[in-house]
Image (cartoon, rainbow, N blue to C red):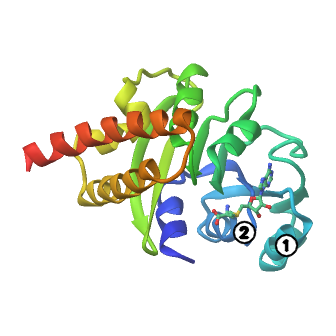
Amino acid sequence: MTDRLREICASLPACGTFADVGCDHGYCAEYMLKSGRCARAYLTDISRESLKKAEKLLADYIARGQCVPVCCDGLQGVPERCDCVLIAGMGGEEILHVLGERELPDFFALQPMKNADKVRRYLISRGAKILRDYTFRAEGKYYDYIVGRGSGGDEYADYEFYFGRDNLKGPSAEFYEKLKEEQGKLKSYACARVSEENRAELRERLLLLEEVIDAIENDL
Ligand SMILES: C[S@@+](CC[C@H](N)C(=O)[O-])C[C@H]1O[C@@H](n2cnc3c(N)ncnc32)[C@H](O)[C@@H]1O
């Protein structure tokens, strides 16, 4: 298991039914089943080839009926409401597509590869309670991770939607490094040949980013 998956699994609670959406290799479901943290796990993947990897890894659990593989889009082929839903390694837009308008699960763990701000906005608009929302570094890359409950309600300020609430509470060295890396990228994109509209968007994002970087540096 990679460090990224280890970090993700560490926040998954004990539950009755667990769904690993876009499971691919199936390592997270394996962790949940092996550690006894869930009674039953659904493995879903839209790709039959990807799902086959998880089916191979979890063949014994599948044979015992403790694990159910489903080749489907998101949760569409899962016949029951799962207590805990993990969606990791997909784009934010894809995560929103999977969650859609259905009732949110009791517990969710989401690791969007991009557009984390859209995921936060969606969750808040749907009445979710965010328990953890932070950036971590693993295998040399930065990842956003958002964990929470499907109900309870919450409020976010504009900066928190962009940067993740816990990152702003007590900025970690990892988060600061991520901002600096993003600052460098945005500066080079803004100098590249992009449309005026995209350049304006990049500048706006850069401005916000630099405000947060300044605030962190002033606190150092
Ligand atoms: C990059 S892999 C991530 C695998 C694993 N969750 C992880 O974090 O390491 C993304 C997986 O999601 C699957 N996937 C993409 N869109 C999906 C959807 N709408 N429903 C189910 N699976 C999807 C892909 O086929 C692929 O296996």
Q: Nearer the viewer, residue 100 or 79?
A: 100
Q: Nearer the viewer, residue 211 or 39?
A: 211
Residue 57 in which image quadrant: bottom right
Q: Residue at x 42, y 73 (%)?
A: 140
Mark 1–mark 2 CB contact (< 8 Å): yes
Q: Residue at x 37, y 23 (%)?
A: 157
Residue 67 on image: x %, y %: 81, 62
- In-image side of 179 versus 125 (left or right): left
Q: Nearer the viewer, residue 154 or 121?
A: 121
Decide: few, some or many residues near mark 1? Use Cα within 10 Å; few <14, some 14-19, many ≥20.
Answer: many
Rendered view: 99 above or below 191: above
Location of mark 2 (residue): 26
Location of mark 1 (residue): 55
At label 2, which amino acid type do we have? Answer: Gly
As measured in the structure, the alpha-carbon distance from the residue carrying label 1 to the one carrying label 2 is: 8 Å
Q: Is residue 111 visible?
A: yes
At label 1, which amino acid type do we have? Answer: Glu
Badge 2 marks a residue whose secondary structure is loop
Residue 216 on image: x %, y %: 17, 45
In this figure, what is the number of numbered marks?
Answer: 2
Q: Residue at x 58, y 54 (%)?
A: 113
